Image (cartoon, grey):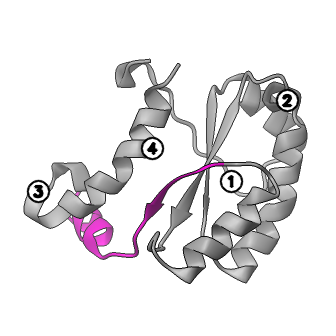
Amino acid sequence: MRQSDWLIMDSAAGLHGKNLTHALKLSHKVLVPIQPSVFDMATTSGFLQVLLEEKAVRKHKTFIGVIGMRVDARTKAAATLEAFLAQFKLPVLTYLRDTQVYVNAAFNGLSIFDLPEYLSGRDTEQWQTLLEWMAES
């Protein structure tokens, strides 16, 4: 699938019921950002369970991927997040580090992909697996 064919929807946290079912009918892939904090994992647990029970997901028409937010993949926090997600059998597609690069780019009306390599190279590299997963049919 070409990036130009992507339709990206953002939803409120905790989308459920008919709204979730309808959104999943329109979706091929769902990204769930989660931080490795006890609060994020506790509140996301119920949502992930509901998501996995949806017909589109069970019938493999919609796929779920997780993004570890504000975490270094080499840390104990990342290992804790992976252990938590193992119960759902969901992949952590990438870990995005906690950095001011995103904030500074947005402040100037840019994304990290608009910045010079020396400012955002480490961050754009973290996005590659995610973009590859998104591009898979």
Per the image, label 4 sits on a secondary structure element best described as helix
Do residues under tags 4 and 2 come within 8 Å of each other at their CB atoms? Answer: no
Q: Is residue 12 above or below residue 7?
A: below
Per the image, label 1 sits on a secondary structure element best described as loop
Give the alpha-carbon distance from disc 4 to disc 2, as whole Å.
22 Å
Give the alpha-carbon distance from disc 3 to disc 1, as whole Å.
32 Å
For the residue marked with disc 3, what is the amino acid? Glu
Side of 65 where 106 appears, left or right: left
Judge by depth and name the residue closer to the eye, 100 or 135: 135
Residue stretch in magenta: 91-109
Q: Which residue is mark 2?
A: 58
Q: Is residue 104 magenta?
A: yes
Tag shown at residue 117: 3
Q: Earlier in the sequence, mark 2 or mark 3?
A: 2
Q: Earlier in the sequence, mark 4 or mark 2?
A: 2
Q: Which residue is mark 4?
A: 130
Where is residue 30 shown, x and y percent of the image?
64, 39
**Label 1 crowd (10 A; few <14 / some 14-19 / many >=20):** few
Judge by depth and name the residue closer to the eye, 101 or 93: 93
